[in-house]
Image (spheres, grey):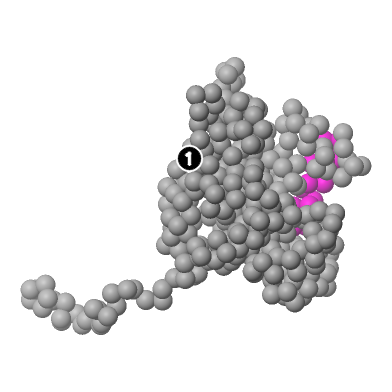
Amino acid sequence: MKTILGPALFLAQYMGDKAPFDTLENLARWASALGYKALQLPTDVRLFDLQLAAQSQTYCDDIAGMLAGYGLQVSELSTHLQGQLLAVHPAYDVLFDGFAPPALRGNAPARTAWAENQLYCAAIASRRLGLRAHVTFSGALAWPYLYPWPQRPTGLVETAFAELARRWRPVLDAFDDAGVDLCYELHPGEDLHDGVTFERFLEAVDHHPRANILYDPSHFLLQQLDYLAFIDIYHRRIKAFHVKDAEFRPTGRQGVYGGFSDWRERAGRFRSLGDGQIDFKAIFSKMAQYDFPGWAVLEWECALKHPEDGAAEGAEFIRRHIIRVSERAFDDFAGGQVQTAQIAQILGLD
């Protein structure tokens, strides 16, 4: 049995232009002072040069050494934006162009090729850093057709998932060669956003052993999916964990879809840890029960609270919820080794 590692912090929401949020070292110093033990690194060149990391063990060693100086390590690398760009429906071309390098904007095929290469680099960089998991998005070809009105043509969803699998299969193979699990954050806006869509994708990639899950209960609460039963069903594929809170308070005016309201006004909204409705005691218990091998990583996205307060409170929140698993059963004192003859005697057998 393994005790969950943590607390760790995803830096995507904390990058900025002013200290201490302007460089990886400044962020490391700040996060360490808050009590974090690891950082989940967005592969943004301002923090981590993914192309260089794939080419240079020295660069990776220097990053790891710098973080170690602050009592930190890398929990996972993140290619959420690159994964998104591997599969973009044309309806979102303009919006997602902003995630690509300026020279590639307006050129969807070049953007897709760049994203694929970035993912290959992420596999190599993860191996160089000695990581066991990597986190990303799946991208989306079918998402605009989520609700079946007008009726979807027969075969549309199947074709979309076949193409999604075709694009991801060589990337999954590259992560397999690197010995790293690829963990999709199941997220609205992505074709992989719940258990059914993950199973559909898993079947399309022939149940690839590296196709795994980044578990984030906040996205499941906002879909009104049973996030605890999800762990029971998919724990063998859960290899990464975002600790993020949320609340869902439907009214007579809006529900799951939110009525195009902004985040403050939606029925479902993300909250800082402890301010929402997620039952983290039950989640951490299930993670301990199923021997989750990875990090508990705070992803902060709150419609109300200041991000620095969310980070400061989040480290202690995660620390309190991590269950140090027992090395023996609580009733071992009543047991002891019983011989076969004794068992037969106890049961009244000859």
Residue identified by numbered label 1: 225
**Residue 42 spot, x, y in % from top left:** 74, 55
Q: Secondary structure at mark 1?
A: loop
The spot of residue 240 in percent (x, y) is 58, 57
Q: Residue at x 47, y 59 (%)?
A: 284
Residue at 70% over, 65% down: 31
Q: Specify the quadrant that holds the N terminus.
A: bottom left
Q: Amino acid at mark 1?
A: Leu
Residue 27 placement, left or right of 133: right
Residue 47: quadrant of the picture: bottom right
Q: Can you say which quadrant of the picture contains the C terminus?
A: bottom left
Q: Of residues 330 and 15, which is closer to you in this image?
A: 15
In magenta stretch: residue 205 = no
Towards the viewer: 324 or 139: 324
Query: What is the magenta segment's predominant secondary structure?
Result: helix
Percent from the top left, x then y, of residue 29?
Answer: 75, 69
Residue 170 against residue 264 in the figure, above or below: below
Region rendered in magenta: 107-123
Q: Do we see residue 255 in this rendering? A: yes
Left or right: where does residue 188 sit relative to residue 335? right
Tell me if residue 121 is in the magenta stretch: yes
